[in-house]
Image (spheres, rainbow, N blue to C red):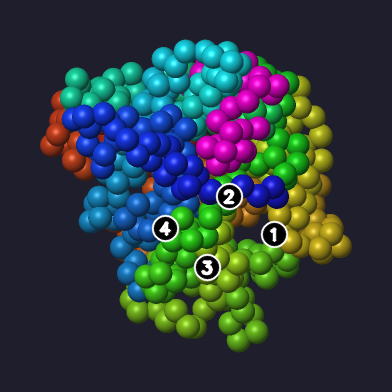
Amino acid sequence: MKKKTIYSIFLILTILVYSCKLPDNIDPKNASQVAPDAIFSGAMISLVNQVGSINVNTNISRLLAQYQAEVTYVTESRYNFSDRQIPDTYSGNLYRSVLMNLKDVKAQVAAKPETPSFPAGMKKNQLAMIEVLNVYTYQLLVDAFGNVPYTEALLGATNSRPKYDDAYTIYKDLIVRISQAITDIDPNSDGFGSADLLYGGDASLWKKFAATLKLRMGLRLADVAGSNSSTIVSQAVASGVFTDLTEGAVFNYLGVSPYVNSYYTEFVLTARKDFCPTNTLVTLMNTLNDPRRASWFTLYSGAYLGLTYGKQGASSYSKFSHFADNIRINPSYPVILSDYVEAEFLLAEAAERGLGGVTNPATHYNNAILASMSYWGVADADAAAYLAQPGVAYATATGTYKQKIGTQKWLGLFDRGDEAWAEWRRLDFPILTVPAAMTYADIPVRMPYPFNENKMNKTNYDAAATAIGGDKASTKLFWDKN
């Protein structure tokens, strides 16, 4: 997979310290305005830090998707969102650190006059790239909560108590926005250059990222009556989705603190031993003789052994498999926002559903699995042997297409908690472990609203809770029909 690295720390410092001589009445230690390139980089870093976080105060999606099990403290595994006010931090990070910064950089870019060094094509590309990240972030919020502040969001003191917009209405608007961004991106013009920490300013890859995001949203709407999902899929495919591993939206950390992956922060810098891989994941992979195990886990007594999800009490970290060193103690371990593996699984499902003119579900299914194997360094022969097993091969694997694709996609989305949790809710596979003594009656299908909203924005909170059928973890989102 193509490597992208955080090198913008030097860019940001250069931008902020742009002159040693300042006008009178200017505080040299507090910038009144930060350059748009630096804000764009900062917003991107905030987004991937949130998506990639394994800190239970910030993002428990890997627990919700049951890739990770907590070793000693199982409160979050049993879906207690309130003790740490996880929804408040989750939404706060996305609204405050990502969307507000994107709003700021968008305003600066829009107001910046065109010059020979900042031509119209470059300006248009920058605005479109900002929009892609806006859409990505709002989709995360909708997929977590349902109805969320949208049209009245990001107004600050002008409106500190925003209304909540209908989730489906937001989705439809996001599709309009991502479609316009795809149209606006010109592969022959520059973007943010070195401030673009995903693609280094390569507009053609941003266009593919945007098209794949649109494809994702089209399939998310596949069970929603009247959503025009087939047209959305067709348009996304025509725009050009990811076609190989080198194109994915994959963020690689610099590897020097604080620009390190969350695993490294938790397991190395703070020396915690809070997580093991789940028995849900490891047992399935053992059953299928999945060769990715060696890239994901360590051995315990010569075998791969997962920790029972949500198990009460003092489980011993030393008595189970751990996440492999390339994940757990690798400061540069990447965060994947979207990639070719995801695109091919989406196309497999589109083909099964007869959406967008996509055909040959087995081919796309195979492509997705083989691409995942390649990404994790599995030899071609081992990948082919895995795919040939009756329990994996598309023609013979157990169940409907939702079970076949859902199970293998869950494996292919490994360590992408937000997206894996969303697709599990939509496809209903694989079968996850229901832990004992849960906070809720079943595995959550949405995140409760931020707890401070009931105090700070009560009227709009109450209206939103009523509109979705109750602010409960068991309230299904509009696209979760089964």
Spatial separation of the CA atoms under disc 3 and disc 2: 19 Å
In the picture of the structure, the residue carrying the numbered disc 3 is 328
Residue 476 drawn at (x, y percent): 40, 36
Q: Residue at x 71, y 35 (%)?
A: 242
Q: Residues within 10 Å of mark 3 (few under 14, many from 20)?
A: many
At label 1, which amino acid type do we have? Trp
Residue 480 drawn at (x, y percent): 48, 34
Spatial separation of the CA atoms under disc 1 and disc 3: 15 Å
In the picture of the structure, the residue carrying the numbered disc 4 is 258
Task: Decide if residue 420 is in sight here.
Answer: no
Closer to the chain start, of discs 1 and 3, is 3
At label 3, which amino acid type do we have? Arg
Q: Residues within 10 Å of mark 2 (few under 14, many from 20)?
A: many
In the picture of the structure, the residue carrying the numbered disc 1 is 376
Q: Secondary structure at mark 2?
A: loop
Question: How many labels sit on residues?
Answer: 4
Closer to the chain start, of discs 4 and 3, is 4
Quadrant of residue 202 in the image?
top right
**CB contact under 8 Å: marks 1 and 3:** no
Quadrant of residue 105 in the image?
top left
Question: Is 306 or 418 nearer to us in this picture?
Answer: 418
Quadrant of residue 462 in the image?
top left
Q: Which mark is residue 5?
A: 2
Q: Magenta stretch: residue 224 in it?
A: no
Is residue 209 left or right of 290 when viewed as pictured? left
Identify the magenta region: 174-202
